[in-house]
Image (spheres, helix red, strand yellow):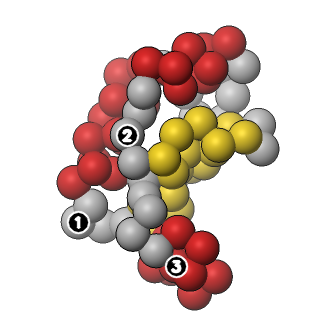
Amino acid sequence: MPRVTFYSRPGCRLCDDARRQLELAGPSLEIEEIDVDSDPALRQRYGLDIPVAVAGGRELFRHRLTPEALRALRNA
């Protein structure tokens, strides 16, 4: 499985839920979590439009982890 960059922020319930689902989907999955509030450019880019997961330069999902995103992740 590829490395996943996961954009989130502390206190985001959707982010917490999506992170747990990612962890369950692939125990060997490497997840790099980035707080969008840690960088003004990321804060501007994503705002409240989180969580977002990216793998292989491609956005997997935004807001909620979907079955399609899970299939794409497993097939990457």
Direction from residue 49 to residue 31 in the image, left or right: right
Inspect the image, locate mark 1, and give the three-letter code of the amino acid beneath it. Gly
Please identify, in this view, whether the residue under mark 3 or under mark 1 is nearer the observer: 3
Q: Is residue 39 visible?
A: no
Question: Can you tell which mark lies on residue 11?
Answer: 1
Chain-order first, disc 3 or disc 1: 1
**Do the residues bearing badges 1 and 2 touch, measured as CB atoms within 8 Å?**
no
- Can you give x and y, in whole percent of width and height, for residue 41 in the image? 64, 82
Mark 1 lies on a secondary structure that is: loop
Instruction: Determine the residue positioned at 52% across, 69% down.
Output: 46
Q: Give residue 54's position: percent from left, percent from top.
A: 63, 44
Amino acid residing under circle 2: Arg
Q: Secondary structure at mark 3?
A: helix
Does 11 appear above or below 55? Answer: below
Q: Is residue 63 left or right of residue 20?
A: right
Question: Badge 1, how many Cα within 10 Å: few under 14, some, many 20+?
Answer: few
Residue found 57% across the figure and 87% down from its top: 40
Q: CA distance from mark 1 to mark 2?
A: 16 Å
Q: Which residue is mark 2?
A: 64
Residue 1 horizontal/vertical position (percent): 65, 20
Q: For numbered disc 2, what is the local secondary structure? A: loop
Residue at x 26%, y 61% (from the top left corner)? 12
The relative height of residue 50 versus residue 41 in the rendered view (above or below) is above
Name the residue carrying label 3: 43
Query: Which quadrant is home to the C terminus?
Result: top right
